[in-house]
Amino acid sequence: MRLSRFLLPTLKETPSEAEIVSHRLMLRAGMIRQHASGIYNWLPLGLRVLRKIEQVVREEQDATGAQEILMPTIQSADLWRESGRYDDYGKEMLRIVDRHERDMLYGPTHEEVATDVFRKNVKSYRALPQNLYQIQWKFRDEVRPRFGVMRGREFLMKDNYSFDLTYEGARHSYNKMFVAYLRTFARLGLKAIPMAADTGPIGGKLSHEFIILADTGESAVFCHRDLLDKPAPENVDYDSDLQPLVDSWTSLYAATDEMHHPDHGVPEGDLVSARGIEVGHIFHFGTKYSAPMGATVTAPDGSSQAVFMGSYGIGVSRLVAGIIEASHDDNGIIWPDGVAPFDIGVINLKVGDAATDGVCADLYGRLRAAGKDVLFDDTDDRAGAKFATMDLIGLPWQVIAGPKGVAKGMVELKERATGERHELSIDSALAKLLG
Ligand code: P5A
């Protein structure tokens, strides 16, 4: 992509409405623009990051055997009357009346719709277990939308719904998601800690929140220090018994302040007290929805049985902000590999100089031919402004070409995370970037 053609409305000044660093940087880097309170436009740079995160989430879900579907954003209120949540959900639910005076709503979550899909399409225990997921927009009319996409009213969530014949089966489905979440957040460059959690309006008794530690986090959290350097599991066999692996995490104390209790048993020096951002939340709630909504299957003994269910959420749009909170410096964002909007920025320091133009065009072409996402700064801005923009938007690598270096056959390669710059021959720079 040529920067001269790319919609990248960066801001030099710090926007006054943004209280936390991720919100400031998302506005300054031209990733998002507010449409209304808690509702945002995603501009090209922001959407690229959102899509990259979605893809990591999707790959880790697919690896567990979960199947992707897409449910509607607008739902019928009747389903929520069946589950008994229509009146309970309160003012966070955006209620809509259609032209036929039917009560509708913009989905804040999809337990009812998923249960309805299941009950209409699965009749026998033989089809179990099932785990269906989607990546879909939600709307919650939050009292205090704030911090940009961190607490929006409209936000993107990955949500799954699992269906099992037995409690033990449901526990395995829960454990699969527990492990998949550890892997997903690690791939996004985040250290997310599972913590015993309150179930709120989703319900059930068993629940974990996945929390990343950040000073700007909305909740106070407490955990055993050993959780901070516990590595995420690799090479997982999702058909094996995952309970020992899950226990190795949950046996170390971790709780959000609602669940924190004074007799936690952790020696004082080992207890970390910090602030955190909730990036995921998993629930097991048994037959809370399947029983009232009649989501039953025929069991092996011929009886009709309500299925055991769980639901599992990841805040995909919140993660964009969460990753920035965890990875930035005074100059801007530092994207971890795998979520960066482009892999490499190519900077032409002297547009119009034939030799420099030629080297840049060559680099741009060869990097793209090798499958890299490249942002090519072909504008005639000052060098200082170009460097500032590239640092602000945080691409992992920058290749800088100017007439002096080009005359010697050299370019500069800068790694955003370390700030290290090296002068290299064009071929060595390419080898390093493609190696
Ligand atoms: C689980 C999947 C649920 O809604 N039903 C379907 C369950 N859980 S949850 O904890 O309420 O939300 C899941 C994740 O969504 C993110 N999230 C938000 N992100 C941005 N703005 C919001 N207002 C918001 N509310 C929730 C969180 O990451 C949460 O863990």
Image: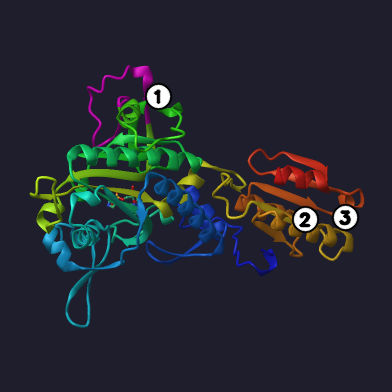
Picture quarter with the N terminus: bottom right
Find disc 2 in the rendering and name its residue. Answer: 363
Question: In which quadrant of the rendered view does residue 258 lie?
Answer: top left
- For the residue marked with disc 2, what is the amino acid? Leu
Instruction: State the count of labels.
Output: 3
The residue closer to the viewer here, 285 or 335, is: 285
Q: Where residue 368 sits in the image (x, y, percent)?
A: 70, 58
Is 298 situated left or right of 353 in this image? left
Q: Residue at x 59, y 65 (%)?
A: 9
Q: Secondary structure at mark 3?
A: helix
Find disc 3 in the rendering and name its residue. Answer: 403
How far, Cα to Cα, is label 3 from label 2? 15 Å
How far, Cα to Cα, is label 2 from label 1? 46 Å
- For the residue marked with disc 1, what is the amino acid? Arg
Q: Nearer the viewer, mark 3 or mark 2?
A: 2
Q: Where residue 132 sits in the image (x, y, percent)?
A: 31, 54
First reached walking from the N terminus: tag 1 or tag 3: 1
Mark 3 neighbour density, 10 Å: few (under 14) some (14–19) many (20 or more): many
Residue 225, label in figure: 1
Mark 1 neighbour density, 10 Å: few (under 14) some (14–19) many (20 or more): some
First reached walking from the N terminus: tag 2 or tag 1: 1
Residue occupying the far left of the picture = 303
- For the residue marked with disc 3, what is the amino acid? Pro
Q: Is 267 part of what is drawn in magenta? A: yes
Question: In which quadrant of the rendered view does residue 4 lie?
Answer: bottom right
Q: Is mark 1 within 8 Å of ligand 1?
A: no
Span colored in magenta: 251-273
